[in-house]
Image (cartoon, coloured by chain):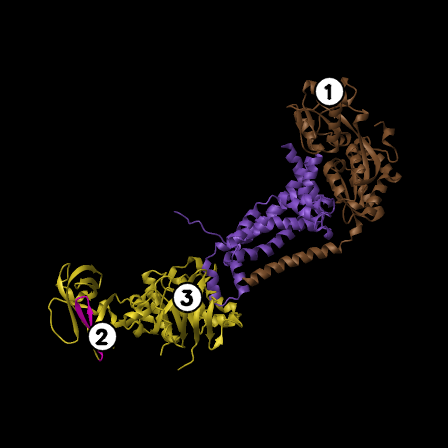
Amino acid sequence: MELIWQGIVKAVELVFGLDAEIWEITWLSLKISGSATLISLLLGVPLGIALALIRFRGRNTTVALINTGMGLPPVVVGLFVSIFLWRSGPLGFMELIYSPTAMVIAQVIIAFPIVAGLSLASFQALDPKLALQLLGIGASKPQLLWLLCKEARLPLLAAVMAGFGGVISEVGASMMVGGNIRGQTRVLTTATVLETGKGNFDIAIALGLILLALTFAINFFLTRIQQREHLQWPKLS
Amino acid sequence: MRRCASFFFLQVLLLGLMVVEKATAAESNKNVILSTTTSTQDSGLLDVLIPLFEQQTGYSVKTISVGTGQALAMAAKGDADVALVHAPSLEKQYVADGKLLNRRLVMYNDFVIIGPKEDPAKIKSAKTALAALKLIEQSKSSFVSRGDNSGTHNLEKSLWKEAGITPKGDWYIEAGQGMGATLGIANERNAYTITDRGTLLALSKRVNLPILIEGDKALLNIYSVMEVNPANGPRINATGGKAFADFMVAPQTQNVIKSFGAEKFGQSLFVPVAGKKEEELGV
Amino acid sequence: MAEALLTLRDIAVHHGEHVALQRASLEVYTGDLLALIGPNGAGKSTLLRVMGMLQRPDHGNVLFRGQNALNGNPLELRRRVATVFQEPLLLNATVYQNAALGLRLRGTSQVEIERRLGPWLQRLGIAHLIARSARTLSGGEAQRTSLARALVLEPEILLLDEPFSALDPAAREDLLRDFQGILRETSITTVFVTHDRDEAFALANRIGVLDQGYLLQIDSRENVFYRPETESVAEIVGIENRLTGVVETSDGDDVTIRIGDRRVHAKGRFSAGAKVVACIRPEEVSLNRAHCEANGLNRLKGQVVALSSGMTHHRIIFNCGEFDLIALVDRKGYINREPSYGDELTAVFNATAVHVIDKKDCRGGLAVGAILL
């Protein structure tokens, strides 16, 4: 217990003492996971809509693949991405290994199935005739997409939060493809592993707390948008 | 439906272009990949030396700290430009195979055997590490091993081998983790273990096991730097790797190594030995 | 003859193996009120979707005012018609926002929207609900909102897919009445799908009959309901008596048909020996206790074998030897002496009430729908 208290004290010290390295690590975490979530959003939501509305051969296989993808162990993703990005690998010429870009790539692979799968579910929750009716009063295809996204905004925001949560907290892939290099690819999660390995438990706990606080703040913000209107539980007298 | 599919593929294409653009924009020969071990990283020495090197030469170093086995394998595959490890027997193999070139000694620190204050196996009476291990095995006292094929683990294994013992049983605990975590386990279980002095000093607040054996030549932990053979793979930065290796044995650097830790722990963690031969150290 | 507003030629739609629409052709003229009727799965909704340019047919042409609707800019043409479905399908917003959606999608200014929407909300009786969330509306209010959303667009064709069937009887009656009033005032060309024959008869001036993907007959209301071309159509429009027989004698316009061991007099031009189906609406059959003689009337003696009483009518199944006749008789005429099981009565109906169809026209309808006059 004393350990956790020490951790809290250390966290306050580091954050408010404007420890440059901590801020750098935190900012990098945000940038990498933020970009990965954004890209997953741009790829995953349209795919979710497409799967929900269009019947094509291989649709069921695609959905099964996405659902499997939701449970991919991050460290396995990291391993496979590394194999591709190592100098000895097929994409070695891109010299991406041990860079933030490599981490974004790995995190997109982790977050994309989550966002796509949950988007699919959120669009399937809409009345299947709704799309047809909106076309029936003159919506163009882009307008239709926009309206459906607005109608499904509650579960869609949940999908984004799930995607973000999945990558801001992962360490396996970030470690493998990023290398935890100081000043370049060290993020909150990999730094926590490092400090724990060194035995600096107070710093490790501090980093963990900062990560939790960060994730909570972002989710709080998104939840407020999501929950603007909610079901009223009827008042029983 | 076709338009949806093409929109999707356009996205992927854009992402791909972004990636390629970023990649080719990077200056390839400014990056040096150094493969080293977790304990080297954990000691904090590299946090001092790397910035120094980068300042002096303008290179940007990517330090990848993993297990000794992985560090050497990476170098052999050509995924690193230079290696800094402390596993002489393994290193010599890689040099013999031609995978690693120009092996030069850099520094050493030493290992010590720590254990419970009460010293149930009475290893304090033994003067050598070998004798101590024999006593530990005889008494079946709890012993925590790194168990991760690291340099430390290899040293431990070679000692057991020399003593003619295959350690097995409930008393022999294989942690499978880094030095810090292993010390944590030893501390919890009140067990014996072999550790490098550097990590022990860094964690002295948390580890309550006193040093029972030290100074034995068999416990010397020798660090060498080796350059990766450019033939190992594509895009190896041989110039950069050599620059780093040269840096590690340069007199100025050696001085920095000599004084590292003196302020914090009251004693240096490493002894610089560039230019010397292993036989001179009595190993 | 005026130019058709919408022309469909040889439209076929497949859902995988299943054929939803088989080579249907029809034309819609300005001012038409066309009802599409038929059993479930007949292809009515599919046809409506093709007409609303919401579904591409796998074969065939769609022409809107002579312009090919299948290539070119489908959006521009699609926006000239409006479709309303059985469920209101409103968005999670206020009534006003929902009703204004169609106009907003077309980029209409707020001022213009307010100006146009107001009167429609009044006409549909939902002006007092504009600020309410769509989630809190009753079924009738929601459907009225959906209609307002479509009507305010002043579409050249209004397409409705069973718009009243999801409502409870009271709401349905109300809305039907209001809607009829709107149609009278505005003369919007309307095509609607319904499985309710009475609704179709009440609203429409033309009827299209579909079954199993075939458009069996498309004609004026009277022709379809009283002079169906095939037995399938007769069944769909509610002519429950379809008696197969052989033409015995034919004299100009008059024919005598032998059905079982009875003779039925009817009107039509058929050759002797032809196999035909005599179609008689149950409403046209009256049941008498006395057996009187008169020309032109068909009299068939028989026995009541089943009787079910509704609020205003008795539905009686009447056995005439080798076949049964179904009669729908007004209860008013029988207050004192209600028919009952086993009663021996005489069924009476006019020759003109018998619509005769050639039996060879009755094979599951490969009718390419007739173009109406």
Give the residue furthest to the front. C273
The label nearer to you, 1 versus 2, is 2
Residue at mark 2 to residue at mark 3: CA–CA distance: 37 Å
Dot 2: chain letter: C
What residue is rendered at 77% in x and 32% in y? B198
User: Color used for chain C?
Assistant: yellow
Asked if residue C254 lies in the magenta stretch, the reply is yes
Per the picture, the main secondary structure of the magenta-coloured stretch is: strand
> Visible in this render: residue C117?
no
The quadrant of the rendering that contains the N terminus of chain C is bottom left
Residue at x 89%, y 38% (from the top left corner): B251
Q: In the displayed structure, does residue C178 sit left or right of residue B274? A: left
- Place residue B242 in its image quadrant: top right
Which chain is in brown here? B
Which corner quadrant of the image does residue B85 belong to?
top right
Q: Residue at x 49, y 65 (%)?
A: A135
Q: Nearer the viewer, residue C103 or B4?
A: B4
Residue B144 seen in the current view: yes
Q: Is residue B178 above or below residue B230?
A: above
- The residue beneath circle 3 is C21
Q: Secondary structure at mark 3?
A: strand
- Judge depth for marks 2 and 3 and give the one in front: 2
Give the chain of mark 1. B
Q: Amino acid at mark 2?
A: Ala
- At mark 1, the secondary structure is helix
Q: Nearer the viewer, residue C96 or B64?
A: B64
Q: Which residues are magenta?
A: C252-268
Spatial CA distance of label 1 from label 3 is: 90 Å
Q: CA distance from mark 1 to mark 2?
A: 122 Å
The hue of chain A in the figure is purple
